Image: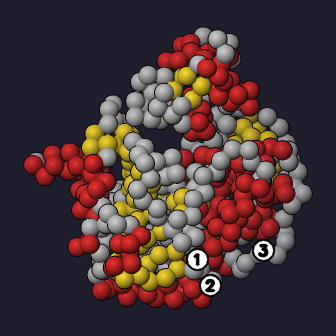
Amino acid sequence: MDPKNVIICRCSDVTLEDLLELFKEGYSTFEELKRIKRVGMGPCQANTCGKMVQWEIAKYFNKPLEEVPFHNMRPFTMGVKLKSIKEQADEE
Amino acid sequence: MKSKADYVIIGGGISGCSIAYNLAMQGAKNIVVIDKSYMTSGATGRCGAGVRQQWGTKMNCLLAKKSVEFFENAKEILQYEGDIEFKQEGYLIIASNENEAEQFKKNVALQNDLGIPSKVLTKEEALEIVPHLNPEQVHSATFCHTDGHLNPFTMTDAYYHAAKRLGVEFNFYTEVLDIETKAGKITAVSTDKGKIKTNVVVNAAGGWSKEIGALAGVELPVYSRNHEILVTEPVEKMQGPMVISFSHNIYCQQTPHGAFIMGRGDKDEPKSHTMRSTWQFLDKMSSTVCKLLPKIGELRVIRQWGGLYNMSPDHQPIIGGTKDLEGFYMACGFSGHGFMLAPMTGLLLSELILGKTPSMPMENLSLERFEGQDLDEIETSVV
């Protein structure tokens, strides 16, 4: 399948071709890829694409999967409205 | 990694990358940049992505103005293929009361004297620019239309690529363990990947600059503290400028990509290197934004994080050398504003290192300004 037709990150619209180009330029960690291309930084917070990105790094750089660090996961697990947080805080 | 270099820069954030680029541009060779993690892993990559010229001290105003002039042409100057996402739709600084409005008028007069096109706005004019502001929370405002947003990652990446083309060597995931000196001069930097012989070290280590100074035996009057921030899901464009309020303790902007970024300071935050995310921040941030910009309360937060402000005694950077150790230079103590000042940081420090006359006087940026005397000017326009 043509890498430009393989969508890796649905939230930020990043294809396999985008990742391969970044690998070629020398970016080799999930943290770098996130910052240059926003892969994994959308509403799903890499819950959909994370494993695929990790796998593609392993494949391209010929490393065992367990040696490719996953990205640094930060809160939240899912989106929450600012208003809801405020209302909850007011109740407490 | 080189075993010998003419210049070793510690810190792969925007300051380190800008210093490396500016040195190389002026013909310096054998430049090495070291960072213990990935590029922009420190304060640069954790900042609010804002660029403003509306400051309360002359030094900050001048550094910011000349930096904005660089950003306007950065893509061409650095020949960067990517998008640095420089969006000049202004900073709207909200005054909540008469006292703040008076101080802001003085700031605008200073800014205008220095050629910065800021102006004082009435409440009604402010609401025209950002209609979803809660009118009850606005007394008046100031606005500068050439302030705005800039992508910290791609802007640093642009410096990185330009510096690399000029021959600069970058070593990421490499930690500095010691700075060796002999008879008041630097002799080497040792890292976990080996030793580099050098006579010049630049400390651009952001949140860890005090610790890097200590390795060289130089005591720096700076400290770090956590500063939290969050980002929402991306939405259709609804806000042009960055909105700031010092009294409400908030800055909030919509990036060109659509997400809102907002942060606040906490004056009780202790000195430390923690970059934790807390629920206390979330509660206060949500409450503030719902009060000042109620419509934004409808947006979902997708991520929060922390980063280090490296604070100096007068909230203005320390850029220069030190008489205590020959060959030791620093760019630190930016107090939360190193990203937007980076073009001038790189230019001025490289000129100083290469023995040229700096493009603007640097006495008020020196480490020596803190010795004994009362400080001339303290920047108070800080969130």
Q: Which mark is residue B114?
A: 2
Q: Note whether B153 is above or below B128 in the view shown.
A: above
| Residue B145, percent from left and from top | 54, 72
Q: Residues within 10 Å of mark 2 (few under 14, many from 20)?
A: few
Q: Amino acid at mark 1?
A: Cys
Q: Is residue B212 left or right of residue A51?
A: right
Q: Is residue B355 left or right of residue B122?
A: right
Look at the numbered discs 3 and 2 and tell me whether their residues touch, using CB distance below 8 Å. Answer: no
Look at the numbered discs 2 and 1 and tell me whether their residues touch, using CB distance below 8 Å. Answer: yes
Label 3 to label 2, Cα distance in Å?
Answer: 18 Å
Please tell me if label 3 and label 2 are on a single chain.
yes
Q: Nearer the viewer, residue B376 or A2?
A: A2
Chain label for disc 3: B
Q: Note whether B49 is above or below B128 in the view shown.
A: above
Query: In this orientation, does residue B311 appear?
Result: no
| Residue B346, percent from left and from top | 72, 61
Residue under circle 1?
B61
Residue under circle 3?
B358
Q: Which mark is residue B155?
A: none
Residue, x 60% and y 89% (percent of image)? B113
Question: According to the image, what is the colour scheme of the structure?
Answer: secondary structure
